[in-house]
Amino acid sequence: MRTHARVVVIGGGVVGVGTLYHLARKGWTDVCLIERKELTSGSTWHAAGLLPLFNLSYSVGQLHKYSVKLYESLEAETGQHVGFRKVSNIRLARTKDRWDEYMYYKGIADTIGIRVEVLTPDEVKAIWPLCETDGLLGAIRHPDDGYIQPADLTQAMAKGARQRGAEIYRFTTVTGIEQQPDGLWLVKTDKGDITCEHVVSATGNFARKTGAMVGLDIPVIPVEHQYIVTEPHPAIQARHAAGLPEMGVLRESDSAWYMREEAGGLILGPYEKGAPCCYMDGPADDSEYELFQEDLDRLAPHIETAMVRVPAFGEVGVKKVYNGAIAYTPDGSPIVGPAPGLKNFWLNEGHSFGVTASGGAGWQLAEWIVEGEPTIDMGGVDPRRFGPYASRGYLREKNEEAYRNVFTPHYPDEEREAARPLKTSPCYDRMKALGAVFGSVYGWERPNWFAPAGYGIDVASLDKPDVITNHNHPTPDADGTVKEIWSFRRSNYFEHVGNEIRAVTEGVGLQDMTPFAKMLVTGPGARAWLDRILANRIPKQRGRLALSHLLTPSGGVRAEFTVYERAANQFYLVSAGGLERHDHDVLERLLPADGSVNLRPLTTSMGVFVLAGPRSRELLQSLTDTDLSNAAFPWLTGKALSVGTVGVDALRVNFVGELGWELHHPIEMQNRLFDLIIEAGKPLGIRPFGIRAMVSMALEKSYRNMGRELSIEYSAYESALDRFVHPNKGDFIGRDALVAGREKGYPNRFVTLELLDATEADARGSEPILKDGVLVGRCTSGGYGWRTGKSLALAMVRPDLGEVGTELEVTVLGTKHRAVVVPESPFDPDNLRLRA
Ligand SMILES: Cc1cc2nc3c(=O)[nH]c(=O)nc-3n(C[C@H](O)[C@H](O)[C@H](O)COP(=O)(O)OP(=O)(O)OC[C@H]3O[C@@H](n4cnc5c(N)ncnc54)[C@H](O)[C@@H]3O)c2cc1C
């Protein structure tokens, strides 16, 4: 065994081997993989091998698309048969909400370039004659989808990697991993040690055991997953004998199962309620090719619906039931990218569709390792999207929840309930008493909107379609009511959000934004360091605020911070709450080695209130002796002041486009501050407002969001950040690429669109944009703007179509809407209200 390598990949399942293959393809041939048993002996050998392209995440969708394309070519490349059967995949719909979900997905697929066809029930019958079509509204079909033999696929990628010089050591166990003082990693095995630059952990169900070797708490705990294989059925055998094509994969989403042919019989794979987490402490040391005792009772409701939909399924005996461990994460997406806090330690873990994802995940991870950045925005799978709050107990609840929701409709406004409330601001109970309906981000509870006193929808009055995945609202309160119905369209809370916005626009509103990520950057080198890493100028004048972006070397946007110089050599950085670990990790990685800059996370010690609206000055002035006049306290500045007895840093900035302040305060004084503000605000008609109101108001200001309009996939210039980017200020990360890119021209242009005839459903982001029937862009955000009375979207379009007045079409839930490019910031374009 070698003693040195550039990269050591741990784990010889489909995911680890896919990573090794792509590293070798990128030209890093001095790489090896270590597998404790035989290749595929973890989860991979018993996978059903389906390759579902369907995914509502723009990142994961692109990874899956890449995989399927790669798998088609592997046999020709390596000479190894992979058993790829492109038999297509049909997803049935029985409810209107399901149809909306499919149409929403079809929009995403169109923007990614994944083919999706729409079928009538009769067309389903023609392709799948054994399927009864009673009660179906229709279906979608992926013609390029199918299944593969997971073990053969793994062997083919192993062969492709070896052919390029990579080495694979089987029956070798990694027993320890240590980072040396020189930064290199020492990977210890039972057959000897290897020193390397990079380590990739792709250890499937062992993820937490591997993580423990380097002090990482990887948020992966598997769940039991079963599928049933039947004896052959004469009707299927007859089809084969007659030379008819395989019927393909069939998914009854509303009954949470998939089915496909297998050796003349059928496979049924349900995603049932009550499937437990397993391997809580990892599999045993000698575990290989392991299956659990089957539990058919748990599958019974799904089996019954399968027999109704495909009666042939009930006419044959069960040949075998597979019950194996399937790795899960709290949101069901994998963990692909750099491990937080560790240099050159990478994770490719938590795959529940690992056969499907392995190609794409390996491709992007190899780019990240070799080039320093991936080319696809991996935000949806980045390991840093979870924080240290994701404890073992949290994972048990959330991962089981993610599993049982694989087939429930993925409403964009859904708020899952497991493990909540977890992190609460001190004012949580006060907000609740005011009617807050909470959502959750990064473990934090945040008011989404406020329901009027006594408001509730009787669940008995709701339409209850006869489907297993009937799940469009939270668990009812004791009186049988719920506050919200989740939907792809405007839902019950729409008008209440409108009322909040009206209150903020006409008077004053209070919002709790405590989850904001906060960091204090101090030290003699702080200013110079921030200036070197961020694209905006760091304000020279103490107290000035600057919105600053951290770019990738190729000029895309990696992070966004509000920067405020609180005192000499003391900068306070604020960024999105959900990105705390990500944003703070990228800052840490860039710290100079000379110790001249220090970072101090402040997220949990500082609370944040947003006070916004034309009467916010009047209110705040009544509580402080600091002069809040425009001359003394202009827009985009900050100051330390006292609100009553509470010392705060007041920043005159907000995300809603109204006069207002963010009040950053010691978290232990939050309730005192809350009571002071509410009391003083009563005569002014103060109202609390939530995230949904904020999102609508931000949209009307064309404010960009990370992961949407701002992404590593778009240059800062494509996102129209010109006024925040200063190539003339001196060198900063991404500067050269920006300058060069501007000369060459970019493929996208950021625009604001008005949808002219959307009355029931608005864009949400990822809708396709067409001109004369040709795809010319995609929406990145969307919604209804209450102050402008318009359905709006932010979007990326072909540059020649970005002029104001250009007419385009946006497809929302399958319906084409006329859209027109409007000037940026449709509400108060001159920021008069902000500057008031
Ligand atoms: C019943 C069932 C059906 C499924 N069907 C599908 C499907 O149809 N489509 C799909 O895409 N996915 C499916 N999956 C999921 C799929 O099986 C997994 O996502 C995939 O196999 C994960 O691959 P992996 O490489 O991450 O993990 P694994 O295959 O488990 O590989 C991890 C490897 O790491 C090795 N390892 C761990 N620790 C060490 C160490 N210290 N030293 C050396 N080696 C180590 C292990 O021995 C193991 O071989 C299914 C899963 C189940 C349970």
Image (cartoon, helix red, strand yellow):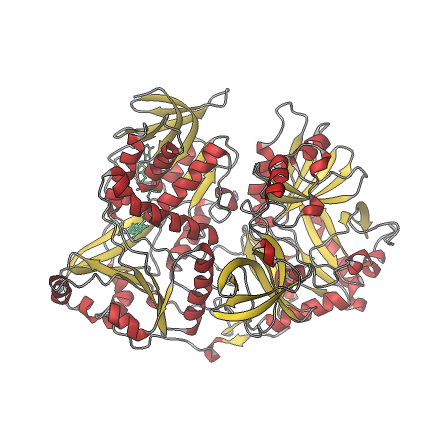
Q: How many marks?
A: 0
In the image, taking residue 613 as reference, residue 447 lies left or right, namely left
Viewer-closest of 329 and 534: 534
**Looking at the figure, which quarter contains the N terminus?**
top left
State the residue at coordinates (56%, 47%).
Answer: 714
Q: Is residue 115 above or below residue 493?
A: above
> Residue 707, position in %: x, y?
55, 50
Q: Is residue 268 above or below residue 9?
A: below
**Left or right: 204 as drawn, with respect to 371:** left
Q: Is residue 759 left or right of residue 61?
A: right
User: In the picture, residue 12 is in which quadrant?
Assistant: top left
**Image check: 797 left or right of 500?**
left
Query: Split into 4 quadrants, where in the image is the C terminus?
Result: bottom right
Question: Residue, x 84% and y 61% (percent of image)?
Answer: 618
Position in image of residue 654 (x %, y %): 72, 54
Ligand 1 lies in quarter? top left
Q: Is residue 468 visible?
A: no
Nearest the eye: 677 or 468: 468
The residue located at (27%, 53%) in the rendering is 147
